[in-house]
Image (cartoon, grey):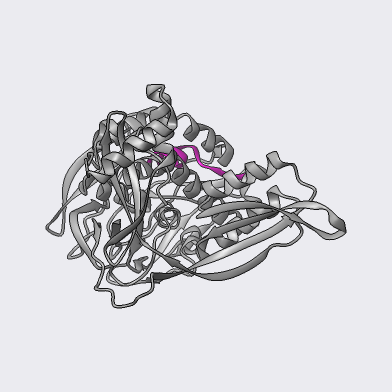
Amino acid sequence: MRIGYLECFAGISGDMLMGALVDAGAPVELLQRTAASLALGAELRVSKVSRSGIQATKIDVVVQDRVHEPAAATGPVEHHHHHHSHDHDHAHDHDHAHDHDHEHKHEHGRSLPEIRAVLSTAELTQRAHELSLRAFSLLARAEGRIHGVPWEEVHFHEVGAIDAIVDIACCAAAADALGVEAWYCSAVNVGSGFVNCAHGRFPVPAPATAELLKDLPVYSAHVQVELATPTGAALLRALGCRFEATPVMRTSSIGYGAGTRELERFPNVVRLSVGEVAAAPQTSTQPNQDKVTVLECAVDDLSPQVLAYTAQLALERGALDVMSAPVTMKKGRLGTLLTVLCKASDAELLQQLIFRETTTLGIRVREDNRAVLVRETTPVATEFGVIHVKAGSFHGEEWNAAPEFEDCRRAAAAYDVPLKTVMQAAMAAWRTRQLGPALDPAATTLQAGSRS
């Protein structure tokens, strides 16, 4: 299984993560196309810089030929703001806290539905699109919680919104292109000191960052500047990072993404290692054990169209799987049992979704143990293009394998052939190991699909 490990000893921001992804092998041309497809008048400026002797990739978002100026190394940082549609009580934003030393005048910005509309027209794979939506939903909900307003009413300051949209969309596209199936992360250094926001000076981490990093391992060390930003924290959450010990892996590429500031005797970079899981020798006769949160409710008064819509939304917001089954409820009524499987960190968000979209008055929540095979996704070359095949193995023996449905569906539509023909071709190529290019930019659209 292909994994990515982020080391946030100098914090995390959207532009730093984007730089690390490119430095680790994501095609910069793909990110430039992604930025252009957003139609926001923004472009990327990519350069190599040195941070305490480490060469790293620095990516700036340029809007109307303007790049944000870096803040003084020891001075306060001014933030862009989110604000709310009902008044002028502006909230703290967003990603480039490493960069900004000026304040923009308050003006009406983009709401989350407007940002969703922008993302829907961009050239993003399904996986990248879902990751982008998840990150922005997390940002909006964090701001809504801080200011006591519905998350739908949170607006993103115009300039800050463009930066955040480009950062998040390009990070999502790059993460998808690298083909990483599971993300791991070190504890996050949030820095220290104070930042200047719309309401005055706040201690680091700023309110939105603190909300997004809640329940995650963080610390403060080495420098008195803000190191972790809301957009960086939202991307860690959206990627579903596991904050565990350094995974046993065979590293194939390492990328460094630079922050704007050059700090004295401190490498202002985030490091990304990408590679394959190197499983320790297994002595157990049982498959690997895992835990999953189960959300469940039964309804007998809801349209099947609404149920289908809710299931799709849940998958877009990070659910591992969604199932529905017919059940007989009290008074002999026919109903539907809706079951959502998710990570514990996504449970609260998905509970809110179920309550909002369905007619249920209660949700059963439990944590189940599950036995899982070691998963590995392999791109194979077929006459219909590159198709990913997901296999499950135990003690090195492959027990199950299946082609990714979304890959096959797109190929069948593109070549106007039966879906089963593409699936059979993919399995035949997998059995003979006709491997396809894992990072072929030209195959990016065809390689899309949820590989959870």
Quadrant of the image occupied by residue 431: top left
Q: Residue 213: x and y, percent?
A: 46, 64
- Please report the residue visible at 31 percent of the width from the left and 29 percent of the height from the top: 384
Q: Residue furthest top?
A: 416
What secondary structure is the stretch in magenta mostly built from? Answer: helix
Q: Which quarter shows the N terminus?
A: bottom left
Q: Residue 248: x and y, percent?
A: 25, 68
Region of the chain picked out in magenta, as a range: 153-166
As rendered, which of 164 and 264 lies closer to the eye? Answer: 164
- Please report the residue visible at 49 percent of the width from the left and 37 percent of the height from the top: 158
- Is 272 positioned to the left or the right of 118 in the image? left
**Is 133 located above or below residue 33 in the figure?**
below
Q: Is residue 305 magenta?
A: no
Q: Is residue 161 magenta?
A: yes
**Is 101 located above or below residue 264 in the figure?**
above
Q: Residue furthest bottom?
A: 283
- Is 164 positioned to the left or the right of 73 in the image? right
Q: Residue 297: x and y, percent?
A: 70, 59
